[in-house]
Image (cartoon, coloured by chain):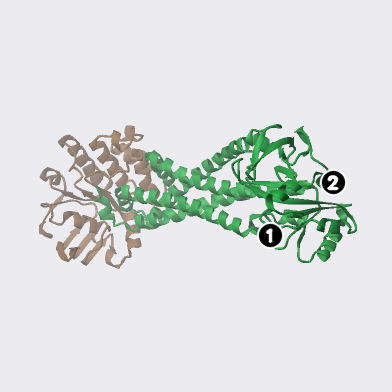
Amino acid sequence: MDPIIATEDLKKIYRLGKVDTPALRGVTLQIQDGEFAAIVGPSGCGKSTLLYLLGGLASPTSGRIFVDGNEYSSMTDAERTRFRRHKVGFVFQRFNLLPTLTARGNIALAQAIHDHGYDPHRFQSVTEMLGIGAKLDHRPFALSGGEQQRVAIARAVVCEPKILLADEPTGNLDSGNSQLVLNMLRTLNRSLHQTILMITHNPEAAAISDRIIHMRDGLVIED
Amino acid sequence: MIGKMIIANVLHRPIRTIVSILAVAIEVGMVLLVVGMTTGMLSQAAARIQGVGADVMVQPSGASLFLGVSAAPMPIKIADLIEQLPHVQAVAPVLLQFNTSGTGGLNLVYGIDPKTFAKVSGGFVFYSGGPLRNPWDVLVDDFYARSKRVKVGDTINLLGHDFHIAGVVEHGKGARLFIPLKTAQDMSGSKNRASIFFVKCTDVGYTDSVLAAVKKLLPDHNVLSVREYMSMMTSNNLPELSDFVTVMIGIAVGIGFLVIFLSMYTTITERTREIGILKSLGASKAYVINAILQEAGLMCIIGIAVGIGGTIGLKILIESNFPTIPVNLTVLWVIRAGALAIGGGLIGSFYPALRAARLDPIDALGYE
């Protein structure tokens, strides 16, 4: 079976003034459909850059990325945006909810952007599964960190993306909420067969995944 | 959903929203007031000329539609020549003077011969007092008396001289102030001269033939029927006024444009992270541009409504406190002012919207 994510010799170099800073030096990996993989490594090893490239938020300097059989390098910026809209969900360390909207509004916004509009059935099943049904009319500032992250997860998966990319999803949470969020991700992976790629510093968080990929200096050093 | 997000954004920063709405309201109000006061004063001036009751007007060549801004006055004996033409019932010579002294503001003063002026106009309707009897008598109309709070027996300074108010008359007879023709001639050094002759026909149906006859008699003069004059009294026929109106509208639109531009520009900077979030959700450039333009459009629409409401309030306030300043509000100009405000607002927000759409999503998500 073809992997849902595949990269070939992926490189990304950031240019700061006249200085080239390589973030990825040639990453080749494959993630299977329905897999829950964690990427671990020290700060600056290129984890986040890899996640952004896989999510189509940036384009690589060289190398190839395949997501669900589509190659990013042949896509325009607009095509990558459309692809992200339909195939990718993001969860961030800082939750990144829109502060002006309620939890309901933040989740519904993803559906609105997705083109297919508001799907009450999917909306309800996701919010119930994540246990935020009672908090839907609260704005982010009125929610705990754990609740905000669950809203962010609901927003990421409400449109049924092929892959869920989580960037340090427990980085801003206490241990209790971290465990809760990790359990949610595990449940999503098990019950909805959701492919998840999670970046984390936390070995306990990584331990919940099926597979741990270690990175250092822009390279995968252990898989 | 985009509507909810826009409304939430607008409510999230109330001061910014109020300032933007007020700027648009001021823009709309400025356009409506400048145009309304200009057209109001023009149409009122034209109506006053019509109220004189004449059918034909004779002015020196090169005279302006603004009565009083005229070339050198004409010999008064011309009145006798016109009077001899067929179908002419009466001719009233009037010497126009602009007064800037004493009363505050600019006033057009008619130097009139009461007898001939009455023949053409049918005579004044007196609210109080009586006709001009002495050289330093003045008649004022009711609007003037009300706005300047003067009455019969008071003394007002006109053309650098004190005049005694002999009567308060009904408005609508050319000017708001009337002094004896001879006094006006003596004060301006225009002995036996007049700035304008108002010609009354024996029947309005003879206007065209009298017009033709006067034109033939006085080929170098500016001869107009009052009907023509009325139709010409628009700012389009007065280039200086038209330019003034255009400049004022330009300034108003510029204010609206700049405030909306600044408001949306700072909004984009402030909400950089939120734009990054939208992009991470797969929002296209068009979606981001559309959201920002709709937000600006919403503020413009509220600003237009506030501007129109405020202008109606100001119109009532101005007209009750300054009866000599009419404000004409027309549906056409309300639509035009609204369109200018919307256009200016959308253009003003387009660059910030484009900038937002072009933001790098990773930089935007990392923005503090």
Observer-nearest residue: A69 or A75?
A: A75
Can residue A31 be seen at all in this image of the molecule? Answer: no
Image quarter in which the N terminus of chain A is found:
bottom left
Tag 1 residue: B71
**Few, some or many C-alpha atoms within 10 Å of disc 1 (few <14, some 14-19, many ≥20)?**
few
The residue at 89%/58% (across/down) is: B84
Tag 2 residue: B119
Q: CA distance from mark 1 to mark 2?
A: 26 Å
Can residue A209 be seen at all in this image of the molecule? Answer: yes
The kind of residue on which mark 1 rests is Ala
Residue depth check, mark 1 versus mark 2: number of the one nearer the observer: 1
**Few, some or many C-alpha atoms within 10 Å of disc 2 (few <14, some 14-19, many ≥20)?**
some
Q: Chain of mark 1?
A: B
Q: Are marks 1 and 2 on the same chain?
A: yes
Per the image, label 1 sits on a secondary structure element best described as loop
Observer-nearest residue: A128 or B289?
A: B289
Image quarter in which the C terminus of chain A is found:
bottom left
In the rendered structure, find residue B171 and report the number of the disc placed on it.
none
The residue at 80%/44% (across/down) is: B114
Relative to A101, is B130 on the left or the right? right
Mark 1 or mark 2: name the one nearer the start of the chain.
1
Chain in brown?
Answer: A
Please provide percent x and percent y for residue B211: 82, 60
Q: Chain of mark 2?
A: B
The kind of residue on which mark 2 rests is Lys
Q: Answer with the quarter of the image where residue B241 lies.
A: bottom right
Observer-nearest residue: A198 or B87?
A: B87
- In the image, residue B125 sits, relative to residue B205, either above or below, namely above
